[in-house]
Image (tube, rainbow, N blue to C red):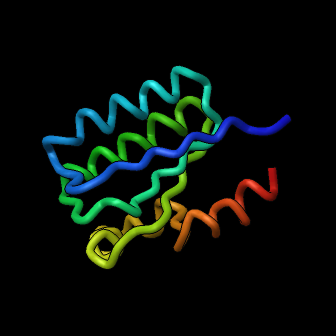
Amino acid sequence: MNPVVEVVRPSGILDGTKAGQFRQEISNLVESNVDIVLIDFQDVTFMDSSGLGALVLALKTVRAAGGKLFVCSVNEQIKMLFELTSMDRVFEIFPTREDFDNTVIAKS
């Protein structure tokens, strides 16, 4: 049985003003019984601590429902934020969407 995979593609600045909307989107996916959530940061130009908090909450929400959450395509600013907060050890981060597909989807 193939897992249900959904991709979330936030864009622009992921901060306090967008964090609520982002959390709601994740909650909706979890309620629809998704197995794997990929957060694709391709179009995100900047993320602050509020955005990071929303991402951590998303991870907890997905895991609590028995799913998995992955991240891909982070820019240098987000990568630095992850490293400074040690979140790069918490999240499984792929350089590109293609890397995610080849690693996670190919194994399912």
Q: Position of residue 19 (x, y in %)?
A: 23, 41
* Quadrant in which residue 25 is drawn: top left
Q: Position of residue 27 (x, y in %)?
A: 42, 27
Residue plotted at (22% across, 64% down):
46
Q: Position of residue 76 (x, y in %)?
A: 32, 78
Compared with residue 93, is residue 14 higher up or lower down, i.e. above or below? above
Q: Quadrant of the N terminus?
A: top right
* Quadrant in which residue 60 is drawn: top left
Q: Who is closer to the viewer here, 85 or 43?
A: 43
From the viewer's perspective, is 61 left or right of 19? right
Residue plotted at (52% across, 73% down):
95
Residue sitting at the far left: 17
Residue plotted at (45% across, 34% down):
61
Residue sitting at the far top: 31
From the viewer's perspective, is 93 left or right of 83? right
Compared with residue 54, is residue 32 higher up or lower down, i.e. above or below? above
Residue plotted at (36% across, 41% down):
57
From the viewer's perspective, is 24 left or right of 73? left
Residue sitting at the far right: 1
Q: Position of residue 43 (x, y in %)?
A: 34, 60
Image mark count: 0
